[in-house]
Structures are given as structure tokens and as C-alpha cells.
């Protein structure tokens, strides 16, 4: 039980109208307007109240009770939630960048697609000044761990978050980004990390009995003295190549890329077309801006690579694994990406329109059957793309151009229903 919960009898209850007034004053404070005041709600009872979409950057909510509160899409960057009770709260899509959540209670809270980069979720101890002597008095003997039991962090970004000593029993981190996250001495029994990106995470001295790590990215993970009994790592990618290694290529990759460029420039009269089908490309490092037009790369692994502004037009990329890769502003016109794994991939601003070949001929980009859950397609050019049977659940599609797209049988975000119907009718 958190310190705030133990002091609940001393907390002042705030009503929704009073809260709305505080939020308005904080907005003025944030904008430097007259009449503004920073939101200081330390040790207030705010349970069940509605904060949806509010900007509480830098607010003080130390020791506050926010149980079952609605904080979806709220901005709590650099806010103090030290020892706050957020049990059962809804924080879906909320931003908690660099927030102080030490000793917070998040049992059963929902943080689907929330952003907690650089957040502090370590164990803590809470003190207050005496009413008469003004000296600090501990409210708890010893440190209090952050309680994340049964919390839902699906698709959340916890990059570089510090979670040492947290209790995460049966928590859901599926498809979450935990790159460089400190999970030292955590109780992770029964936690679900299926499909999560744990590259560079530190799990030393943690309890991980019966943890689900299926299809997770585990390269660079530190597991010093970690309890791993019953862990399921089927399909997980470690530091070892999961397919053919790059040292099995006929020549160094840079040489093959030079030959491929010659092949493109000469319209296949010279050079050699690049064939990397079935290879694990993760050891290639930064491939941003690379020209792989018309590449043969079916079944190739690209997980976590920077492929920004890369050119894959007319490429054969069937069943490729692009999870957590960055394809921002990439050229994918006319590419064949059927059944590709694009979950949590950044495709913001990517060009997936048909490739025009002249004389009225064009090649349509094919994404049928693709897994695009949690993918970032903001501003992507998806006109006339084949998305039949694709899974776009939780995908970000704001400003994406879907006119003429074939979405038959596709799973779509709830807020895309109207757009999808329009696209099908054109």
C-alpha cells in the first residue's frame, strides 16, 4: 500500500468543477498568461476525476490519490507523481516524459501506448515536515517499491526509464519499447513482454519466472544473476543471427551495394542486382538513405534498423521482419511487402503509392496480410495501396492519405472507420 493511501483520511477531496478550475489556471500558467497558477495538488483525493487531454506539465501531484481517474491523452511531462496512487487509472496515450513516479501505485492501471521515456519508477521513501517542529518525519520505514502489478503497458514507450525495484507481477509489456530501460531487482513474475523491444535493457537481479518473451528483441540485454525459470523465448531475437549472417554474403555489403547501384543506373546492363533474401541485416548498422531499389529481400530481418529515406521501390520484401525499424520518408513505391512484420515500425511520411512505369503502366504497393499494429504511419502516402487483410490495430494514421486504398478485411483503428469507408468508395 502506498504512503498516500495510508494517509487517505487526511487528503482533501476535490470535485470535478474545482479540478477544472485548477486545470484552467495551470494552462494559463503554462502559456504565461495573467491569472495563471501552477497546479499543486499534492495529497489531494482526485480519484475517479476526469483529466482527459489536459496539459499538466510540471504539475505537483505528490502523494495524490488518482485511483480510477481518467488521464487518457493527458500530458504529465516532468510532473511529480511521487508516491501517488494511480491504481486502476486510465492513462492510455498519456505522455509522462521524465515524470517522477517513484513509489507510485499503478496496480491495474492502463497505460496503452503511453510515453514514459526517461521516467523514474524506482522505489522510494516518503517524508513530511512536522506540524510544529518542521523536521522531516518518515511516513514509511524503508523504501516503497513502485507497484505495477497487472498494469497494461501494451505498445508503450519506456525507453531509458528507471524501474529499479519495481513490482511488475503479471504486468503487460507486449509490443512496448524498453530500449535501455533499467529493470534491476524487479519482480517480473508472469509478466508479458511478447514482441517487446528490450535492446540494451538491464534485467540484473530480477525475478523473471514464467515470463513471456516470445518474439521479443533481446540484443544487448544484461541478465546478471537473473532468475529465468520457465521463461518462454520462442521467436526472440538475441545477439546471435536469426537467419543467414552477413559474413555469408558473396562479398562485403558495401561492395554489393555498389554493384547494385551500377545495375540500377545501367538499367540492368551492368553490375549486379542485390539479393539478400533470408539474411539477418541487423549487424549492418545505419542504412539510412541507402538505395535498394528492386532489391530481392524476401524473409530478410531488418528489426530495429535505421532505414530513414531508404529507397526500396519495386523491392521484393515479402515476409520481411521490420519490427521497430525506422522507415521514415522511405521510398516504398511498388514494393511487395505481403505478410511483412511491420508492427511498431516507423513509416511516418513514407511513400507507398503505386510505382509509375510510363505508358500508363504502374505497379501497386502490396501490404496485404501485413502486421501493422502500433505502426507509425503519420503522413504516409498510402493512396491506392493494397492493405487487404492487414492488421492496423492501434496504428497511427493521422494525416495519412488512404484514398483508393483496398482495405477489404483489414483491421482498423476505431477512429479510422469513417476514413476507411471513404477510401473504399472512391
Image (cartoon, grey):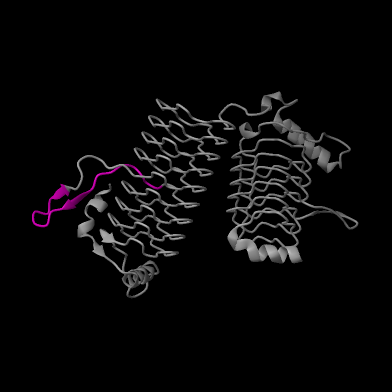
Query: What residue lies at 77% left-to-right and 35% top-to-bottom?
Result: 274
Coordinates of residue 267 in the picture (x, y in percent): 86, 42
Q: How many marks?
A: 0
Coordinates of residue 123 in the picture (x, y in percent): 31, 42
Q: Nearer the viewer, residue 225 or 276?
A: 225
Query: What residue lies at 44% left-to-right and 49% top-to-bottom?
Result: 116
- Asked if one can make out residue 399 in the rendered structure from this viewpoint, the answer is no
Drawn side of residue 141 relative to residue 325, left or right? left
The kind of secondary structure the magenta stretch mainly shows is loop
- Asked if one can make out residue 369 in the rendered structure from this viewpoint, the answer is yes
Q: Nearer the viewer, residue 266 or 140?
A: 140
Q: Quadrant of the C terminus?
A: bottom right
Asked if residue 136 is among those painted magenta in the image, a careful observer would answer: yes
Drawn side of residue 172 relative to residue 104, left or right? right
Drawn side of residue 373 relative to residue 55, left or right? right
Q: Nearer the viewer, residue 23 or 314?
A: 23
Which residue extends farthest bottom?
A: 34
Which residue extends farthest right?
A: 359
- When asked about the image quadrant of residue 385, the answer is bottom right
Query: What residue lies at 36% left-to-right and 62% top-to-bottom?
Result: 48
Q: Which residues are magenta?
A: 119-137
Query: What residue lies at 74% left-to-right and 31% top-to-bottom?
Result: 255
Drawn side of residue 355 relative to residue 305, left or right? right
Q: Nearer the viewer, residue 120 or 103?
A: 103
Coordinates of residue 349 in the picture (x, y in percent): 65, 55
- When asked about the image quadrant of residue 140, the answer is top left
Asked if residue 23 is among those painted magenta in the image, a careful observer would answer: no
Amino acid at each position: 500500500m502506498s504512503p498516500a493511501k495510508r494517509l487517505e483520511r487526511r487528503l482533501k477531496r476535490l470535485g470535478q468543477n474545482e479540478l477544472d478550475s485548477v486545470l484552467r489556471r495551470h494552462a494559463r500558467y503554462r502559456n504565461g498568461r495573467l491569472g495563471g497558477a501552477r497546479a499543486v495538488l499534492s495529497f489531494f483525493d482526485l480519484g475517479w476525476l476526469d483529466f482527459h487531454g489536459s496539459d499538466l506539465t510540471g504539475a505537483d501531484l505528490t502523494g495524490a490519490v488518482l485511483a480510477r481517474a481518467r488521464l487518457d491523452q493527458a500530458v504529465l511531462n516532468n510532473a511529480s507523481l511521487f508516491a501517488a496512487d494511480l491504481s486502476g487509472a486510465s492513462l492510455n496515450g498519456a505522455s509522462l516524459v521524465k515524470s517522477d513516479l517513484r513509489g507510485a501505485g499503478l496496480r491495474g492501471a492502463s497505460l496503452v501506448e503511453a510515453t514514459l521515456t526517461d521516467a523514474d519508477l524506482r522505489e522510494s521513501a516518503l517524508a513530511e515536515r512536522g506540524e510544529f517542529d518542521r523536521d522531516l518525519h518518515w511516513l514509511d520505514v524503508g523504501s516503497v517499491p513502485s507497484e505495477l502489478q497487472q498494469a497494461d503497458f501494451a505498445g508503450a514507450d519506456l525507453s531509458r526509464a528507471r524501474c529499479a525495484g519495481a513490482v511488475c507481477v503479471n504486468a503487460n509489456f507486449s509490443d512496448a519499447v524498453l530500449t535501455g530501460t533499467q529493470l534491476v531487482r524487479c519482480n517480473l513474475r508472469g509478466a508479458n513482454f511478447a514482441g517487446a523491444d528490450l535492446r540494451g535493457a538491464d534485467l540484473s537481479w530480477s525475478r523473471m519466472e514464467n515470463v513471456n518473451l516470445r518474439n521479443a528483441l533481446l540484443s544487448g540485454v544484461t541478465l546478471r544473476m537473473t532468475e529465468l525459470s520457465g521463461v518462454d523465448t520462442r521467436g526472440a531475437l538475441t545477439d546471435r543471427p536469426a537467419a543467414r549472417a552477413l559474413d555469408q554474403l558473396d562479398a562485403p555489403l558495401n561492395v554489393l551495394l555498389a554493384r547494385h547501384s551500377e545495375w540500377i543506373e545501367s538499367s540492368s546492363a551492368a553490375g549486379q542486382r542485390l539479393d539478400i533474401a533470408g539474411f539477418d541485416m541487423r549487424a549492418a548498422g545505419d542504412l539510412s538513405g541507402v538505395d535498394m531499389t528492386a532489391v530481392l529481400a524476401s524473409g530478410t530481418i531488418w528489426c530495429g534498423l535505421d532505414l530513414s529515406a531508404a529507397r526500396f521501390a519495386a523491392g521484393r520484401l515479402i515476409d520481411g521482419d521490420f519490427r521497430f525499424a525506422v522507415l521514415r520518408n522511405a521510398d516504398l513505391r511498388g514494393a511487395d511487402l505481403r505478410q511483412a512484420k511491420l508492427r511498431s515500425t516507423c513509416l511516418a511520411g513514407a511513400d507507398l503509392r503505386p510505382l509509375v512505369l510510363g505508358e500508363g503502366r504502374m505497379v501497386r504497393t502490396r501490404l496485404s496480410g501485413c502486421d501493422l499494429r502500433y505502426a507509425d504511419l503519420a503522413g504516409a502516402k498510402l493512396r491506392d495501396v493494397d492493405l487487404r487483410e492487414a492488421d492496423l490495430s492501434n496504428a497511427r494514421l493521422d494525416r495519412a492519405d488512404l484514398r483508393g486504398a483496398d482495405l477489404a478485411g483489414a483491421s482498423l483503428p476505431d477512429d479510422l472507420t469513417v476514413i476507411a469507408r471513404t477510401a473504399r468508395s472512391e
